[in-house]
Amino acid sequence: MVSKAFIFMFSILYLAGCSSVSIGPIEAGEDSYVISKEPATFSSEEDDLLASILAQANAYCLEKKRHMEVKHLNEYTGFFGNDTKTTLVFACLSEENETYQPIAPVVIAAPVAPIQPNTPAPEPEQPKFFPQEKLTNYAF
């Protein structure tokens, strides 16, 4: 009986460590909202934390048929990667809103090949050797 209670208690604690904490979106002013999220204690989710918060904020604004604008973003990584937390303050703006400015489309150009110079590379000079005379080395 004690072992069953121990296994049950251990499994509850294990599952509690695997869940992430997400708060929001919470209204924080006129058309402004806050989302805060931190991953589980022993999770490798922190790389996807920012992407998931931005996707959640964008989905929330799309439900209201508005456009998301990031006002403030705060990422905190604790000691040895523990207590990682990301907080996003964003606004849902309509196209009629005077502060709304659509983002210009991003165009990624193909890399340009390096330009080759027209002048030929100088040819190295051949070393000049003096005419060799018959050398003798007689020690006597």
Image: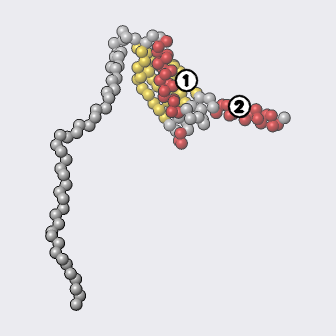
Q: Which residue is mark 2?
A: 12
Crowd around label 2: few <14 · some 14–19 · many ≥20 (10 Å):
few
Residue at 72% across, 35% down? 10
Sequence-earlier tag: 2 or 1: 2
Q: Nearer the viewer, residue 125 or 111?
A: 125
Q: Nearer the viewer, residue 26 or 46?
A: 46
- Residue 113, given in percent of the width and then of the height, sits at 28, 34
Looking at the picture, does residue 69 appear above or below residue 138?
A: above
* Left or right: where 126 falls relative to 101: left
Secondary structure at numbered mark 2:
helix
Residue 29 can be seen, yes or no: no
Amino acid, disc 1: Ile
* Left or right: where 24 falls relative to 7: left
Residue 2 can be seen, yes or no: yes
The residue lying furthest to the left in this view is 131
**Quadrant (top left, top right, bottom left, bottom right) of the C terminus:** bottom left
- Residue 130, given in percent of the width and then of the height, sits at 15, 68
Please tell me the numbered disc located at residue 7.
none
Please tell me the numbered disc located at residue 23.
1
- Residue 121, given in percent of the width and then of the height, sits at 19, 47
The residue lying furthest to the right in this view is 1
The residue lying furthest to the bottom in this view is 140
* Left or right: where 15 falls relative to 63: right
- Residue 132, given in percent of the width and then of the height, sits at 17, 72
Amino acid, disc 2: Ile
Looking at the picture, does residue 129 appear above or below residue 58?
A: below
Front tag of 2 and 1: 2
